Image (cartoon, rainbow, N blue to C red):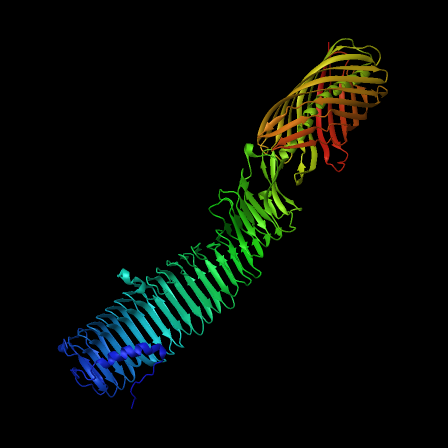
Amino acid sequence: MRTAFRPTFGRASARLLLSLGVAIVALPGVANAQSECGTPDADGNVICGTDGNPYAQGITYALQPADLTVTLEPEVQVRTSDAATAGVNLNGLGSLTLAGEGARIITTGAGSAGVVATAADDVSIGIDVVSTSGTDAIGILAAGNGVSITAPTVTTTGAGAHGIAALGGSNGVDVAFTTVQTRGTGAWGVAVGSTDGDIQITGTNILVAGSGSTAVEAASDSGNISIVSDGLIRATGAGGSGIIATSTTGDVSLDVLNVITETTDDAATLTSGSAIIAEGANASLVAGGGILTRGSADAVVVTATAGDADVTVNGVRAYADGSRALVVNATGNAAVTINGGVASDGANTDSVVISGDTASLTVGAEGVLGANQGNAITISSVNGSTIDNAGRIPNVGGGYAVTALGGPITINNSGSLTSDLLLTGGNDRINNSGDFLMRTDVAFGAGNDLFVNTGQVLFGTGSAGAVRTMVGLETFDNRGLVELRNGTANETFVVPGNYVGSGNSRIGLDISATGNDQLLVGGAATGNTVVLVDVPSGNAATFATGTTLVRAGTASAADAFDLEGGFSNAGLVRYEIVYNPQDFSYSLTGAPSDAAYRTLNYVEGARNLWLKSADVVSGQLRARRDALWAFGGGDPSGKLWLQMHGSVESRDSVRAVDTLGQARGVNMGFRQDYYGGQLGFDFSGGAGERGGFAVGVTGGYISSSQNFAGSADRIDYDVVNGGIYASYSAGNFFLNALGKYDYYWAKATSPLGGFRDNSKGDSYGARGEAGMRFGSDSFFVEPAASLSWVKTSFDDFASQGIGVDFDADDGLRGRAGARVGGQFALGDGPVMAFYAGGNYVHEFKGEDRVTLTGGGQTFDYDNRAIDDYGEAILGFTIGQTNGVSGFLEGSYVRSFKDGGRRTGIEGAGGRAGLRVAF
């Protein structure tokens, strides 16, 4: 014989036991009608058909000694109107089953009930529609060792009217529904309790309206509780609550969509209760929709009394003062995931509060946290906390975005996180791969703290003079961007500890005429960081001794900060960041650019033109001398000569410079070509065997391009010249002299320097040459030496506020060498003379000076004379006594060594000339 159901409830289910017990006692033990559908068969089955509709006295089977199953056929309707009457009332010592698919139960009257079923064993109820009205009316009331209820639609109206109420023992309670709707003061939507059995509540909508109403309440002493809702749970009324689920030693799990507690009475708004309260040994909540409470109670409270709490919410909103949006407590790990907006709008109220042995918060990409005058997040732990943010945690008023307590915290931010942080006294760490908004100081507290930035640290909207500090930070490891550029200069970012730059480390700073942003480092700066600044350009670019961008507190790496690419050119000014080991500062200095240094070669290029046309005249005199020896004697008649020439020379020059701390090697080499023609006339001649005297005039033109190595900078020259020369020979001795004037037009183009300059200038000078010729008609040796003096001028110019002044040095170039050659007859008349030679060339002067001025700074630089070089020539002359004679000659030059200064030369050229006697 089964014993009667006498469950023993603990504190967790005491409230439900008291309330439901009163309701059970209020109903008659034996209904007005008994066994309306006949006596149960041998198996305990009873079928109620539609012929009994509307069952005005209800259906009652009381004190059943064994198992009982009552089946209501489809379309059965039970309608009662008496007070304290149940539509279906079943009780017994065995198990009870009510099967009513397609049936409807409707009752009216105080204390009435749709279904009441109590058993010593299990109770199972399935009914499509239950509707009651009246004070303390109950839709479904069931108690047993195990209870299972399936009721798609339950509606109650009246004070204290409950939708579904169930008490279970060790076999627990399982309630399933589509919609439960109650109206009345103190009404419950679903109220379930158990001793040690599990509770499962599954449904869509629970809508309760009335003061003190609760949508769902579940309590167990040691059983687990699970509540699932994919619709709306709403409690409307003063003091109303959404979900209350508590288990003393069991676990609690909630998976819901939308939960709202509110009241239409503005005066009673603050009395609204919590939307969700979940408490168990372990507790979990998944809320996929929105949760809202307008009362002063916390919106969501999840507590794990002996284990872990795991919470995932989409949106949570708490409106009243003192109402926190989300509170999660655990003795073990407290883990929270937020995928939508969570905020508390009340004054002096935190939004999200998490505590546990360990605590973690994950904010998804759509997550946004906020608070009115409290902390957006308060997280505390014993052994460490973690925040993973892919959403947005902004500044809040009157509190912090994050307050961390207890164990050290690690914050991994891939979204947007404000600097409004109060961290722990442990070894805290922030890993930022998103946007870290430096709106206020960060309070790191004690410990060995670390900030690793692979994303962006942003100052945002600027305020001149703003100083923002990562207070208490030991190391700032920058692998991303620190951005202070916001259109407002004179802002300061302070890192009290060490600064390390690596990878793609960058920092952006504003610079203006009134000041600039700065990074202040309390410790050492190491690694390398690119500084992004809008350097002055155009006329604003000028030489500057230094604008301090970064200042460290101890000795730091000299290359810890550089401009992108190491430097930035602005015309004739080059900007670099220079380290000062005296005060550990890094300053933006403006010194001459490579284009500015290359102006040192401008005068040399013009001087080369004079020397090149002088070489043409020397070559002509050399050919005349060969003809004189070939035919003997002098010809008093005048002779006209013409020569065309071309050559290319490469000047190798790398110069070490150090101006305003900008130390580097500048490639000042260039390649210069020369193409031109020279015309001359010997208007007097001498007499004598292999001797004579001649005086002539000459004029010519050269086109030349001087192209600087490693850049697009160049100078194009057009040069005309005129001069007078004299030649004297007596026996083996000869002497030549030349005086010549050059006038040139130069067009300097410097994309690097940002200028195009048209200049005019001149060169004038003299060359003297002497030598001896030994040998016979068939072979000769001719040592010779020459000395050339040249004076060159070049127009000063200015570009974008930088002045370039030229102080040309005299050119004094010596040449010494010899030729060897011979001659032979070409038939009966013409004679061919051939030769090869070499010379040693030395520049005695040629150190031109350039003065650069700008920004109150003046810099003087001297060009370096070309290194000694050798010259090789090879040529021949074909001549005859009368008529036309001519010659061809090729040359090659190359420096012997660079002398450690790398000012060498290498080049080749050729010339061809005609001489006409008349």
Q: Quadrant of residue 263?
A: bottom left
Name the one closer to the observer, 483 or 896: 483
- Residue 799 vertical placement versus 330 (above, below): above
User: Quadrant where the N terminus lies?
Assistant: bottom left
Residue under the image location 42 percent in, 67 percent down: 328
Q: x, y percentage for residue 593?
A: 62, 35
Q: Quadrant of residue 126?
A: bottom left
- Residue 52 vertical placement versus 342 (above, below): below
Residue under the image location 23 percent in, 79 percent down: 116
Name the one closer to the observer, 366 or 138: 138
Q: x, y percentage for residue 619?
A: 75, 21
Instruction: Report whether residue 413 is seen.
Output: no
Q: Quadrant of residue 721?
A: top right
> Is residue 441 toward the left or the right of residue 134 in the image?
right
Name the one closer to the observer, 215 or 125: 215
User: Quadrant where the C terminus lies?
Assistant: top right
Q: x, y percentage for residue 781?
A: 84, 23
